[in-house]
Amino acid sequence: MSGNQPRALKALVLSGGAGTRLRPFTHTSAKQLVPVANKPVLFYGLEAIAEAGITEVGIIVGDTAEEIREAVGDGSTFGLKVTYIPQTAPLGLAHAVLIAREYLGDDDFLMYLGDNFIGGGMTGLVDEFRARRPDAQVAVTRVADPRAFGVAELGPDGRVVALEEKPAEPRSDLALVGVYLFTAAVHEAVRAIEPSARGELEITHALQWLIDQRHDVRAGLLSGYWKDTGSVADMLEVNRAVLEQTEARVDGEVDAESELVGRVRIERGARVTGSRIVGPAVIGPDTVVSGSYVGPFTSISRDCRITDSEIEFSIVLDGSSVRGARRVHASIIGRNVEVTPAPRVAAAHRLVLGDHSKVQLP
């Protein structure tokens, strides 16, 4: 079923999900555009696709289509040619393949979940697929507790023999990562399957159909860092991992009363006065930090104001201000937010007591 002739390889990037676990940010913004280390998580994926030698990318978009379009444009910034494919409702990963049929044609393609983060890129996975060209290839990574993931079971010859979603008793420790590579064989599979109990066309069902039809389905082991950025805790963890790679650089202004410790990046137009910043940390363009402490694993975006405050292990998005706040920790602060101390409540007790009462006041 597999051939050895090299073919054009496209990419299909899924950016249409609702991002319910990242609310309230995703009420007003696409989850794929929430930044880690001051860059939208989607951009890391697009850069990795370009690095793997793929230039044609179809992006599946939903309710946040306009925001994705505005951020990514025609893709030329990334060295890509982008086509947008609207999805009226998030009806499953296999549904995305179904509606992209005309765009994909009979080309081989990589499917990438736009809210995933892969630290080491995808070039190795793509090269492996191009060299062997199975009918499908899933990216997997070893995890300590596979019960929270889709799990791939491999046969002795390295082929995938079964896929199971969040199994109570996993048969392997190989969790599915949000990267898949397909030949045109997948188009028959997505047409053959039925919606799951949650009403979606599952890509794991399409892959299992291919396996059952004796197609060649392989697993590519991802050796680098991977994270699904679907929750606040995951976003902060990815932010930490990316900041670990930060190099110290000062393109803005830092006064003599301030101290930078470790790998701190001060972007152009930023000003730091009377403050202590302990890296790894990033201070975005045109942001002002004054009389404050910014601790490790913190990324503060552009045009923010951090005044007389302490903040660490956090993400602050564009245009927000934190004033007079003591120890903000493990937080994500959205765009154009104001954080200030609550007004002091007068230490008084107003009492209306009946006869023979007994009251103890703290």
Image: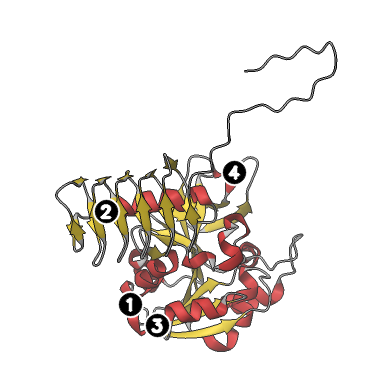
Amino acid type, callout 4: Arg
At 51% from the left and 69% from the top, the residue drawn is 136
What distance separates the C-alpha of mark 2 from that of mark 4? 30 Å
The residue under label 2 is 245
Mark 1–mark 2 Cα distance, whole angstroms, equals 24 Å
Say which label, 2 or 4, has the lower sequence index: 4
Single out the residue that lies furthest toward the right.
Answer: 355
Distance from label 2 to label 3 (Cα)? 25 Å
Asked if labels 1 and 3 touch by Cβ distance under 8 angstroms, the answer is no
If you read the primary sequence from the N terminus, does the residue marked by circle 1 or circle 2 appear first?
1
Asked if residue 31 lies left or right of residue 299, the reply is right
Q: Secondary structure at mark 4?
A: helix
Q: Secondary structure at mark 1?
A: loop
For badge 1, the amino acid type reads Gly
Residue position for label 1: 53
Q: Quadrant of the C terminus?
A: top right
Q: Secondary structure at mark 2?
A: loop
Left or right position of 359 against 75: right
Label 1 or label 2, whichever lies nearer to me, is: 2
Q: Residues within 10 Å of mark 4 (few under 14, many from 20)?
A: some
Q: How far apart in space, not on screen, are marks 4 and 3 (Cα)?
A: 37 Å
Indicate which disc, 3 or 1, sits on the residue closer to the N terminus: 1
Residue tagged 4: 147
Of marks 3 and 1, the one in the foreground: 3
Which numbered disc, 1 or 4, marks the residue that appears first in the sequence? 1
Using the rendered view, name the quadrant where residue 171 is placed: top right
Marks 1/4: CA distance?
34 Å
Closer mark to the observer between disc 2 and disc 4: 2
Residue 39 is drawn in which quadrant?
Answer: bottom left
SS label for mark 3: loop
